[in-house]
Image (cartoon, rainbow, N blue to C red):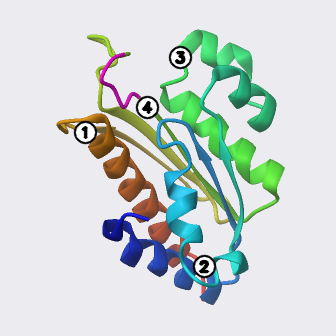
């Protein structure tokens, strides 16, 4: 695990454990980095149910139940897809909360409308809580964009966990 994520991942695990929350991740451009950061922490099995890496459109639909129409209308990199990914992960994993990440890490694949560094996030739960974010990371390379996205997803999970009653 990147040492830069260790304190944040540990804080997520502790906050979830203290509130008896289970979580899932649904990752595209981060390729499992959020789940990896969380599961590096001893005791993560108390709160991490599972992580989905859904890099292709097909996997988003098959594993998370993202409707094909959402991807066709809005694209895989969109707020709508991120929302469907988070809700699908939470439902299929049976967890209190889930975070999703979908974006363009580069160096290719970007456009004027959706440039490299554009990443959408949704954190669903606990309860009816729903927070989404659109970030435009200006980083020198793919690895840094993926690290920044991982960090933001961990921050969203921590905020969500802390919003639940202890």
Camera-side residue of 39 and 77 = 39
Q: CA distance from mark 1 to mark 2?
A: 28 Å
Residue 98, quarter of the rendered image? bottom right
Camera-side residue of 27 and 128 = 27
First of labels 1, 2 by sequence position: 2
Please tell me whether residue 158 is drawn above or below residue 151 in the rendered image. below
Labelled pair 1, 3 in contact (Cβ < 8 Å): no
Helix, strand or loop status at disc 1: loop
Residue identifier under label 2: 16
Q: CA distance from mark 2 to mark 3?
A: 32 Å
* Residue 156 horizontal/vertical position (percent): 45, 60
Residue identifier under label 4: 103
First of labels 4, 2 by sequence position: 2
Nearest-to-viewer mark from 1 and 3: 1
Q: CA distance from mark 4 to mark 3?
A: 10 Å
Look at the image and tell me in which quarter the N terminus lies.
Answer: bottom left
First of labels 1, 3 by sequence position: 3
Nearest-to-viewer mark from 4 and 2: 4
């Amino acid at each position: 695990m990147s040492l830069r994520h260790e304190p944040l991942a540990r804080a997520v695990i502790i906050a979830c454990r203290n509130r008896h929350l289970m979580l899932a991740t649904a990752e595209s451009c981060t390729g499992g980095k959020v789940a990896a950061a969380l599961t590096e922490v001893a005791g993560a099995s108390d709160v991490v149910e599972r992580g989905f890496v859904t890099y292709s459109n097909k996997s988003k639909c098959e594993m998370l139940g993202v409707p094909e129409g959402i991807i066709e209308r809005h694209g895989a990199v969109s707020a709508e897809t991120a929302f469907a990914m988070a809700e699908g992960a939470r439902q299929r994993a049976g967890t209190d909360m889930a975070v999703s990440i979908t974006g363009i890490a580069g160096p290719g694949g970007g456009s004027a409308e959706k440039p490299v560094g554009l990443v959408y996030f949704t954190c669903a739960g606990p309860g009816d809580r729903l927070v989404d974010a659109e970030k435009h990371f200006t980083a020198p390379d793919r690895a840094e964009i993926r690290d920044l996205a991982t960090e933001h997803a961990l921050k969203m999970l921590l905020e969500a966990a802390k919003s639940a009653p202890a």
